[in-house]
Amino acid sequence: MTNLVQNPPITSVSQRLMSIDALRGLVIIFMLLDHVRETFFLHRQVTDPMLIDGTEPTLFFSRTLAHLCAPVFVLLTGLSAFLYGEKHQGTHAVSTFLFKRGLFLVVLEFTLVNFAWTFQFPPTVIYLQVIWAIGVSMIALAALVWLPRPILCGLGLVIVGGHNLLDTLHFPVGSALHIPWAILHDRGWIEFSDSLRLRTSYPVLPWIGVIALGYCIGPWFARPASTALRQRYLLLAGAGALIGFVLLRLANGYGEAHWAVHESTTHTLMSFFNITKYPPSLLFLGLTLGIGLLLLLGFERAQQRKWISTLAVFGAAPMFFYLLHLYVLKVLYLVSVALFGLNHGDYFGFDGIWAVWLTAVLLAAALYLPVRWFAALKARRRDIGWLKYF
């Protein structure tokens, strides 16, 4: 006991950083699974929220599992921003980094990321997806970090909890507010020119709330913070979010499509957990962030397990993995079409969801070594400034 009291910073630093990378690594693998589905199972497209009667349970589970990815990514981005500020000592340093990194991600979404999805140049459609949302959220947080922490935390809670009050607000094409509202909250199309359209797949307002909350929990992970206290906060916050999700879902009202009792228990549960991602409802964020916080707690308590360090490798170089897996998947799809043709209408696709899972497992194993190499390079060559952006 005496030793633990004398050396809390060492234990805290090791646990907080390994657990953060491990959680990020886990959701990266879930993301890989979902992107394999979007590449090789697109002939079985899913809606948002999903159609319970027309979606098999295995497909529903695969898609729902991937719901964890964006909320956890954005929350950990805010948390990592706080830790960056702690390391570099000052709000100005973290604000500058957030602005530069956010701008970098926005440019990346318009260029390398969009090209990886479409292989079209010049593009006729640009999909503003998760990298865009993270980038814009970072730019917003670059300004918000100057607020007093209580105000920032309150603002984050108000955005996450209250943005569904705006669901009925829409602005038609031609209105001065159509484009900003499509970016902020109303998923839709922006006609940029006669030959280019933008799809706001990830309206950014709720994600700004999530990244603010991630920054607000940063002090739990600060160097002098008690490990026991941090784990208690993670338990309370995670369990509280899940309890809130269940209670609000049972009320069958605010900000979400209604659930219903079906003939089978499986389909009733599917209906209950069938939540809206675009933009993410309060219920969507309550469920996913609650699970994410409890996973973070669990990873802290499992530091000595080998699989934790394996997951942390994927989480240590997230942007490198993101770009690499998108291009690998695109090349695999084009090769498959060349070899086997279009076997499901306009698509080449697998016949069963089991093949999606198998492909995701094989790709995760194949990409592990290059990601580990890049993560080691990133850790070793801190003198190369651009590496920190990946």
Image: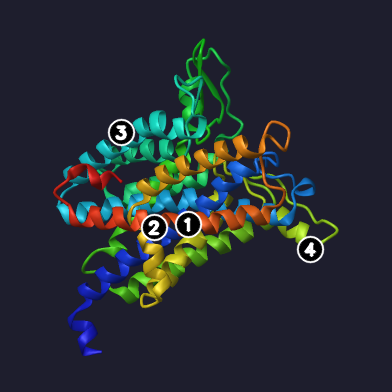
Relative to 292, residue 333 above or below: above
Determine which of the numbered discs, if any, sits on residue 314 in the image: 2
Earlier along the polypeptide chain: callout 4 or callout 1? Answer: 4
Q: Are marks 4 and 1 in contact (CB under 8 Å)?
A: no
Label 2 neighbourhood size at 10 Å, few (<14), some (14-19), many (20+)?
many
Residue 211 vs residue 80: left or right?
right
List the residue tagged with mark 1: 364
Nearest to the eye among marks 1 and 2: give it.
1
Task: For marks 2 and 4, give the CA distance.
Answer: 36 Å
Residue 80 vs residue 10: left or right?
right
Q: Amino acid at mark 4?
A: Thr
Nearest to the eye among marks 3 and 4: give it.
3
Q: What is the secondary structure assignment of the residue under circle 3?
A: helix
Residue 306 vs residue 187: left or right?
left
Nearest to the eye among marks 2 and 4: give it.
2
Determine which of the numbered discs, if any, sits on residue 265 in the image: 4
In this rendering, does residue 273 appear at all? no
Q: What is the secondary structure assignment of the residue under circle 2?
A: helix
Earlier along the polypeptide chain: callout 2 or callout 4? Answer: 4
